[in-house]
């Protein structure tokens, strides 16, 4: 297994990649790679892949991975399968079997590809990392970026860091997600209290973000974030396919909704058919009590 590290001032990370399982680490370290820019990263990735000649190339389903994978596939005359949640090798054909959600998360399909390298982007937390082994040894290969400033057609003028109070949505083990049924900014404050008790984060469907009750950065779904927490508590959420596309990988879903016919109950392991305003105070008290033990 090889790792490819691209960036500026990243040489120190090669040993860490070996510790986590890489047998060989290709590293492209250049000041012009300090900021992620499509032009420079596509060029060096193409160069590195042509040198390393992998049969399979895996990237994260991150904003960078989503940008790079299709461009690389085009340049390398192959295809990319985006947003995979599982990978396997077919024992007979030795083809890479790439499983990904389709139809807005309502079904999963397995894709294969006959050209090399087989490129796939992998959804966050779909796989567990290996345990670090400090005794592991590996080879480090340096690749010259060979970039000139002229190849980069865009300029980073400013960086604005998203302000996050508490746990990041993508990293949260517990997410309390509110839908249109929450009704207001004040309603979301109550969800924040529950998230705090459970050491989790607050997410939302699209309508509360569009209405300004919560920040857009909280949106989960097809056009929002994809999350895979251990526990997903959906409150006042109908369970539309565009929303489920972002949370169907959650281990356990609990739904609170006053409509017994709501689609969310088809996806949820546990459900409460009730007005959330009546349920939430008792639920919060119980959680406090249980977690205090
Ligand atoms: C191209 C496209 C992309 C989209 N991307 C996304 C996306 O990324 N994320 C996303 O979420 N949506 C997305 N949508 C919108 C999506 O189709 C749904 O409209 C949206 O998810 C519905 O949000 P909701 O469940 O909060 O609202 P609703 O569907 O209106 O459901 C509200 C629910 O709250 C319940 N409720 C109301 N009051 C209470 C109460 N007091 N107690 C308990 N329950 C109550 C109701 O019974 C209802 O089930 C997208 C749509 C399109 C077309």
Image (tube, rainbow, N blue to C red):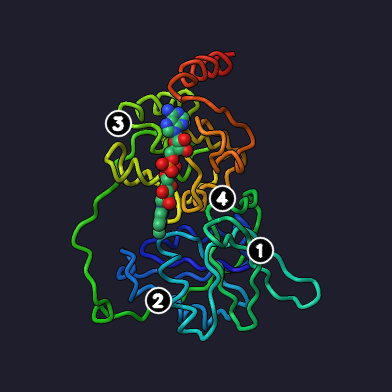
Determine the CA span between mark 3 and mark 4: 30 Å
Q: Residues within 10 Å of mark 1 (few under 14, many from 20)?
A: some
Q: Which residue is mark 3?
A: 185
- Mark 4, mark 2: which one is toward the viewer? 4
Residue 285 visible in the picture? yes
Determine the CA span between mark 4 and mark 1: 13 Å
Mark sitting on residue 235: none
Q: Residues within 10 Å of mark 2 (few under 14, many from 20)?
A: some
Instruction: Indicate the secondary structure of the residue bearing disc 3.
Output: helix
Whether the residues at callouts 1 and 2 have beta carbons within 8 Å, the answer is: no
Quick one: label 1 or label 2, which is nearer the N terminus? 2
Q: Quadrant of the C terminus?
A: top right
- Mark 3, mark 4: which one is toward the viewer? 3
Q: Which residue is mark 1?
A: 87
Tell whether 220 sits left or right of 24.
Answer: left
Q: Is residue 13 above or below residue 70?
A: above
Relative to the observer, which residue lies in front, 210 or 77?
210
Residue ID at (66%, 63%): 87
Quick one: label 3 or label 1, which is nearer the N terminus? 1
Q: Which residue is mark 4?
A: 125
Whether the residues at callouts 4 and 2 have beta carbons within 8 Å, the answer is: no
Mark sitting on residue 42: 2
Tell whether 226 sits left or right of 153.
Answer: right
Quick one: label 3 or label 4, which is nearer the N terminus? 4
Relative to the observer, which residue lies in front, 285 or 256?
256
Residue ID at (55%, 43%): 263
Instruction: Ligand 1: give its quadrant.
Output: top left
- The percent position of residue 49, horizontal first and vertical second, equals 52, 78
- The percent position of residue 56, horizontal first and vertical second, equals 61, 73
């Amino acid at each position: 297994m090889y790792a490819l590290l691209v960036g500026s001032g990243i040489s120190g990370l090669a040993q860490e990649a070996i510790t986590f399982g890489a047998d060989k680490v290709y590293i492209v370290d250049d000041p012009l790679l300090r900021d992620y820019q499509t032009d420079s990263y596509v060029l060096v990735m193409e160069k590195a892949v042509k040198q390393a000649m992998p049969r399979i190339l895996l990237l994260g389903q991150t904003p960078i991975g989503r940008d790079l994978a299709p461009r690389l596939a085009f340049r390398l005359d192959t295809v990319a399968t985006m947003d995979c949640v599982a990978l396997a090798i077919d024992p007979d054909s030795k083809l890479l079997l790439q499983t990904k959600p389709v139809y807005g998360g309502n079904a999963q399909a397995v894709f294969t590809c006959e050209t090399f390298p087989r490129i796939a982007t992998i959804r966050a937390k779909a796989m567990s990392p290996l345990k670090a082994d400090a005794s592991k040894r590996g080879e480090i290969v340096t690749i010259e970026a060979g970039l000139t400033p002229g190849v980069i057609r865009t300029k980073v003028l400013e960086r604005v860091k998203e302000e996050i109070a508490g746990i990041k949505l993508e990293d949260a083990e517990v997410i309390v997600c509110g839908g249109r049924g929450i009704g207001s900014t004040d309603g979301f404050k109550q969800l924040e209290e529950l998230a705090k008790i459970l050491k989790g984060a607050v997410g939302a469907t699209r309508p509360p973000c569009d209405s300004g009750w919560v920040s857009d950065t909280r949106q989960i779904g097809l056009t929002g974030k994809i999350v895979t927490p251990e526990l997903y508590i959906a409150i006042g959420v109908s369970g539309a396919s565009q929303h489920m596309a972002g949370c169907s990988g959650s281990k356990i879903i609990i739904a609170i909704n006053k409509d017994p016919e709501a689609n969310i109950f088809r996806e949820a392991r546990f459900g409460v058919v009730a007005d959330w305003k009546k349920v939430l105070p008792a639920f919060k008290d119980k959680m406090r009590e249980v977690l205090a033990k």
